[in-house]
Image (tube, helix red, strand yellow):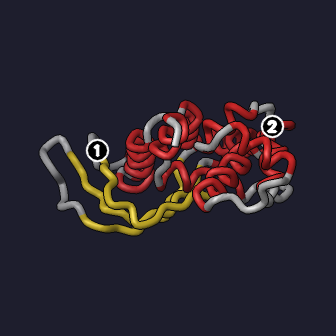
Amino acid sequence: MTDEAMQQIAQRGPVRDGLERAERTKFTEPVPTSPTEQVRFLVEKVKVGTRALAARLGVSQRTVQRYIKGTIRKPRQATREALADQAASEWQPEVRAQVRERASSTTGLLISVRCRFGFDAPGGSSDEARMRRITQRVSPAAAREIIAGLEAGVPEKDLHDLVAHALGEAYFQDGGSRAAGLTVRMRDIDYIDFRY
């Protein structure tokens, strides 16, 4: 695999994947499903060159050209998954932009998570870290910070911190009315889902 493909895999994680899954539920048309359709979409519509796409997928440029011609119909599992992910991440950018703008300005994000929450408070740890299941809507300002981190390509750990801060403010601090100075940490995510 190329360095670029390895770097993209390293950036993946439950928070980033959850945010992207939530956006994909808002698509108005289905994402192309066959490898040939996916490669043609990426090369012709998104204007990703065959060399750049090959680097993203961790295959040769010649292999990408074979997908375009339709001479390869069944890629390896890892390539098939990477190709489907690339096509979905580039699909309907206008819809994605509208969804992000609405969350950042009016609706916020609904976050459902089960993970180990820990706390730091001015007087020391306020509670032993433990598994909790929380479903909470966070403010548009918090959604804006999370989305900005996603768009900037920050590491997964930083996205965890942004989500933990948003949940800390909305759920544990009740919008700032209690537990001043509380810092929330998230670890051992069992699942996390977002809804725009």
- Residue at (48, 41) in percent of width and height: 6
Query: Can residue 169 be seen from the camera position used here?
Result: no
Seen in the picture, residue 27 relative to 112 is either above or below; the reply is above
Q: Amino acid at mark 1?
A: Thr
Front position in the image: 141 or 92: 92
Determine whether, in the image, residue 146 is placed left or right of residue 179: right
Q: Which mark is residue 43?
A: 2
- Which residue lies under the disc numbered 1? 183
* Residue 107 place in picture, x, y as percent: 65, 49
Residue 154's disc number: none
The image quadrant that residue 172 belongs to is bottom left
Q: Residues within 10 Å of mark 1 (few under 14, many from 20)?
A: many
Disc 2 on helix, strand or loop? helix
Residue 67 x %, y %: 79, 49
Tell me which corner region of the image, top left, top right, bottom left or bottom right, holds residue 115. Answer: bottom left
| Circle 2 crowding by C-alpha within 10 Å: few under 14, some 14–19, many from 20 | some
- Residue 37 in the image: above or below residue 59: below
The reply, left or right, for residue 120 in relation to residue 144 is left
Q: In this view of the protein, can residue 77 be seen by the observer?
A: yes
Residue 162's place in the image compared with 73, above or below, is above
